[in-house]
Amino acid sequence: MFRRGAQLLVLLALLCLFGLAACGATTPQWKKSVACLEVEGFALVAEGIEQGKVVGPGTYVGIVHGKSAGTGFFIDDKGTMVTNAHVIRRATRVLAKMEDKSMVDVSNLLAVDPEADIAILRSEKAPRISSLRFLLAGQVQKDQPILVVGNSMDLGLSLYRGTVTNILDEDKGSWVIVNADYRQGASGGPVFDEKGNLISVVAASVPGLGTMGMTVPAWKVRRVVDGTTGIAIDKPVGEFYTEDELNQRLKTLGVRDARLESSQANMLLFGIEQTRDYVFVLEVLEGDVGFGINGQPIARLKGQEEFMMALTATESGTLEGFLLNLGSEPAKVRFELAVVEW
């Protein structure tokens, strides 16, 4: 009787151990691989300008330090992480907060592709995960179910269900358009199929279209990981794109001979990409010119005066409008929208 009871206890213990192992085996990989990113760095601002206030001419490019949030995910057990280029732009340090609350430094930047909006980071401390499978173009279909993981509003990782609504070809930039209710802060987060394969990476929402979002296809991400596209870096972010270097680039920007006279249109429109930094330079050759952006007056310039301000887009592909009020008297200006490259 005692022997039979002991055998039952041993069997029960084995079943419990098997059950725990099974539970561990079915733990979603995203809980081990996806992280909330805490980014320390600096941003460009229009220094000395209050919205709606007319100020005098001068150079209004300033740098402020701050923190921002995003999402990233490890793709192998070597510590290779994928996120958006715009998430870690001008970063001096990047920390990954894992699902188990541990903090991992992922400040080493392996490569960046501003066009694809993808950055590849690396950490010496890697989670124990299997390598992620990247789906090819023909393996992603419209209307298929998706799972999006993101640090929306910097409130921690959340899982969002949705669908693929469209796949744009190379001529249109090669985006996977999805319908999922993630928010700001999910940038850099993975989009999985129901088997845990990578479909794409969250890049931006689509303004005015509710829960529609633009994501970078896995096959484009794979090319950056492999080194086929993008820029190879392999150094800490704080040593690659430093504040001193940025200041030097801003100082060397000049004005090209692009003239606008009073008889021409007074609205200038430029496409501002999220993964770029811009500086708008305006020089008045003749006359008296009022200058504003997005309907807000900024400065009034007279002949031989110059104005410069930094611009950073908040949405990919945003159009910014520069209004030049040339007045009733003849006026001539020169202008340039300069790109501060990686």
Image (cartoon, rainbow, N blue to C red):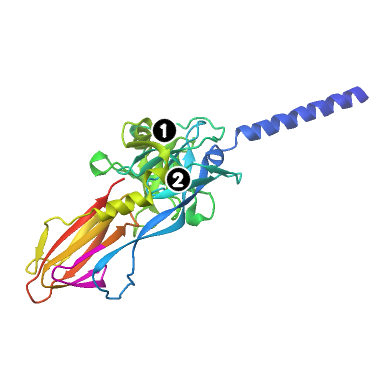
| Closer to the camera in the image, 10 or 58 | 58
Residue 300 included in the magenta stretch of the image: yes
**Residue at screen point 61% across, 44% down:** 100
Q: Amino acid at mark 1?
A: Phe
**Residue at screen point 33% across, 69% down:** 48
Residue 80 included in the magenta stretch of the image: no
User: What quarter of the picture does the C terminus occupy?
Assistant: top left
Residue 87 placement (x, y as % from top left) = 41, 49
Q: Give left or right: position of 163 versus 175.
A: right
Q: Secondary structure at mark 2?
A: loop
Residue at far right of view? 1
Q: Mark 2 packing: few (<14 Cα in 10 Å), some, or many (20+)?
A: many
**How many marks on residues?**
2
Q: Is residue 44 above or below residue 18?
A: below
Residue at far top of view? 3
Q: Are marks 1 and 2 in contact (CB under 8 Å)?
A: no
* Residue 273 in sight in this render: no
Residue 135 placement (x, y as % from top left) = 40, 33
Q: Amino acid at mark 2?
A: Gly
Magenta span of residues: 290-308
Residue under circle 2?
189
**Residue at screen point 56% across, 35% down:** 127
Residue 260 placement (x, y as % from top left) = 10, 63
Q: Which mark is residue 134?
A: 1
| Closer to the camera in the image, 339 or 181 | 339
